[in-house]
Amino acid sequence: MAEEGSEADTDRGQIDEAGGSSGLTQAEVSLFDLVDFLARNLVLHPEAVEVKQNTTEQATSFELRVHKDDLGRVIGKQGRTAKSLRTILNAAASRVQQKAFLEIIEE
């Protein structure tokens, strides 16, 4: 079981290095990928998902844009899905001693 986990970490590192993280740390790339993965798996139009990342010394913020038909799926009833996405992002960010914010952009 431990071999599988370490193997996945090794593969992940190779993908990030090959993809060129453009100056971002491994943790920032992981948070970006997390937001992208969650959003693409929630929506009906995954090709329309756009995630932008703004990093400062204090925190990392993510802007999420989706197809207008998918906005309700990302926000959810009474904002529950959006709140859950933010909770997951904050939990992942806290593991690497960072702060992260998610903003869902309506257009």
Image (cartoon, rainbow, N blue to C red):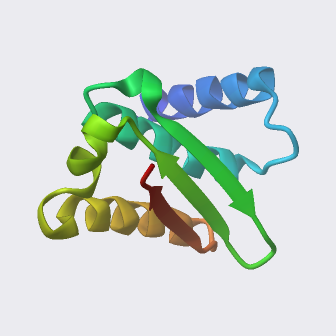
**Side of 39 where 50 appears, left or right:** right
Query: Which residue appears farthest toward the right when viewing the image?
Result: 23
Q: Residue furthest bottom?
A: 58
Q: Nearer the viewer, residue 2 or 29?
A: 29
Between 31 and 6, the one lying in front of the other is: 31
Count of labels in the image: 0
Q: Tell me: 103 left or right of 67.
A: right
Between 74 and 20, the residue placed more toward the observer is 74
Name the spot of residue 71 as percent of width and height, x first: 29, 47
Q: Quadrant of residue 98?
A: bottom right
Q: Residue 104: x and y, percent?
A: 44, 58
Which residue is at a point 37% across and 35% down the rendered structure image? 67
Residue at 49% from the left image edge and 63% from the top image edge: 102
In the figure, 44 relative to 102: above or below? above
- Whole-percent x and y of residue 11? 61, 23
Q: x and y percent of residue 43 in the render?
A: 28, 34
Left or right of residue 5: residue 39: left
Instruction: Point out the image quarter for the N terminus.
Output: top left
